[in-house]
Image (tube, helix red, strand yellow):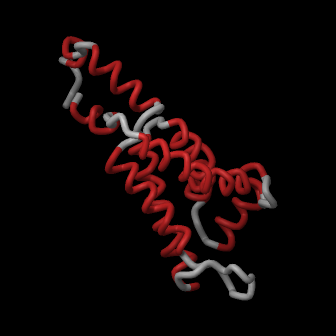
Amino acid sequence: MKQLSVIFNTRNHVSGLILRVTAALVILPHGCQLLLGWFGGMGYSAAMDYFTQTEGLPVMIGFLVILLQFAGSLLILLGILTRLVSTAMIFLFLGMIVTTHWQHGFFMNWTGTEAGEGFEFHLLVIGLCLSLVINGAGVYSFDAWLSKKWMQKDLSPHLANLPV
């Protein structure tokens, strides 16, 4: 039970809501580009080709990148499994920095004259997600609702037979 409370427990603070909405607003459009081809994106097939052929990622990793940016940002927005999804997002964006963006330096390619994008955007996402991992989802989240429900009930008889 303690492990679950660590995952879902959150204080009743508005900062988690602000962090969740901000993270989702900057990540979800990229997920929509990759999965659906929206906002000038390449869509699923072309994104998978890019990840597997250009970046050399295994098919499963390419699929998880697309899934995490699309569905993961929706989960963060709603405050569902916020700490777990935010942790996965941190590893995703660290991976992006190491595999692709580090070589292009810190700054984004605002003028379009550079060979690629730097990693400043990625650091911002990592910071947002790290704050969510530390503080939880905050108010108006599924995690807060579930945590309250669990705190109101005595679940110990049901949990007695679970392996710890």
* Image position of 151 (left or right of 140): left
What residue is rendered at 54% in x and 75% in y?
119
Q: Please determine whether, in this image, residue 127 is positioned above or below residue 25.
A: below
* Image position of 147 (left or right of 162): right
Instruction: Looking at the picture, tell me which residue is in the foreground, 124 or 98.
Output: 124
Q: Please determine whether, in this image, residue 50 is positioned above or below residue 81.
A: below
Q: Position of residue 12 (x, y in %)?
A: 36, 34
What residue is rendered at 76% in x and 56% in y?
45
Q: Please determine whether, in this image, residue 102 is positioned above or below residue 159.
A: below
What residue is rendered at 23% in x and 28% in y?
1
Q: Please determine whether, in this image, residue 29 is positioned above or below residue 105.
A: above
Work out which quarter of the rendered image holds the C terminus and state it: top left
- Residue farthest toward the front in the current orientation of the protein: 14
* Image position of 126 (left or right of 161): right
Quarter of the image where one finds residue 109: bottom right
Quarter of the image where one finds residue 107: bottom right
- Numbered-mark total: 0
Q: Position of residue 110 (x, y in %)?
A: 69, 79
Q: Position of residue 32 (x, y in %)?
A: 71, 51
Q: Position of residue 151 (x, y in %)?
A: 27, 21
What residue is rendered at 33% in x and 36% in y?
10
